[in-house]
Image: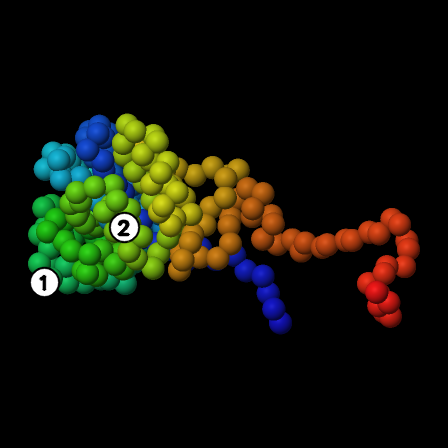
Amino acid sequence: NLKKVSLELGGKDPVIICDDADIEVAAKGTSWGGFLNAGQVCTSIERVYVFDKVADAFTDALVAEAKKVRLGNPMDDATDVGPMSSEMQFTKAQEKVDLAIKEGARVLTGGQRSDKFDTGYFYEPTVFDHVTSEMEIVTEEAFSPVIPIQRVKSIEEAIHLSNSTRYGLGCTIFTRDIEKALTAADDIKAGTFCINNPLMENIAAPFGGMKQSGIGREHGIEALEEFRESKHIFIDYNHTIKDWWYPNEE
């Protein structure tokens, strides 16, 4: 049997921090986009490409935001982020962090289980720099509260690196130049593109990925079309014999 399917298969979503971005907004937005639900969101920010000119300021600001995140009981209003979903997921996260360190990445904050809890798989929000595009922490979905930072010299380099994985679920950019953002949106292979506000969805808008991030779309008219069959109906109102029918007597 042939079945129509709609699949969302995860991603490795980047964020681009341009040199004209508001650093405080970009750092807080990246923290939210990367650490929400302990990074266990299919559209979590999992890669940062920041312009050289603002890299130091942004990195310091993001580390400061990561340290502010309050771990705890998800049912407590004072909690920002709860534990990871399972021991298996926690172990995978730690293995990826350990491998990144072995490959040469530098942990700026986090990188380990929180020591504030006797139970629960609480993982500290983690920020890396000194990462390269070949490292697994950059190429493979981590699904954990881990954000690696890479520096770029131009929007062209940021776009190239954003497209350098097999995934294409989402992307975010922080910039005051909306035309620049829209140009990047055209060039980056991602099903959702957020400008100055990550993890935004709307039930009326199509959601899904490009490349190996999925097939089809959820939400909106596009989602309905995934499960409809189109039919072509051709009508000849003249109801006459056509001269191209057999025998052809030109």
Judged from the image, the secondary structure of the residue bearing numbered disc 2 is helix
Judged from the image, the secondary structure of the residue bearing numbered disc 1 is helix
Q: Residues within 10 Å of mark 1 (few under 14, many from 20)?
A: few
Is 109 located above or below residue 232 in the figure? Answer: above
Q: Amino acid at mark 2?
A: His
Say whether residue 100 is left or right of residue 4: left
Picture quarter with the C terminus:
bottom right
Identify the residue at image location x=43%, y=39%.
Answer: 201
Q: Amino acid at mark 1?
A: Lys
- Provide the residue designation for mark 1: 102
Q: Name the outermost residue toward the right.
A: 240
Task: State which quadrant residue 212 falls in.
Answer: bottom left
Q: Name the foreground residue: 98 vs 83.
A: 98
Identify the residue at image location x=19%, y=33%.
Answer: 19
Residue 80 on image: x %, y %: 26, 38
Residue 185 on image: x %, y %: 37, 41
Say whether residue 119 is left or right of residue 165: left
Residue 170 on image: x %, y %: 37, 47
Q: CA distance from mark 2 to mark 1?
A: 26 Å
Identify the residue at image location x=61%, y=68%.
Answer: 2
Residue 223 on image: x %, y %: 56, 48
- Provide the residue designation for mark 2: 160
Q: Residues within 10 Å of mark 2 (few under 14, many from 20)?
A: few
Q: Depth-wise, is mark 2 or mark 1 nearer the camera? A: 2
Picture quarter with the N terminus:
bottom right
Task: State which quadrant residue 179 falls in.
Answer: top left
Q: How is the image coloured?
A: rainbow
Let me know if residue 125 appears in the view.
no
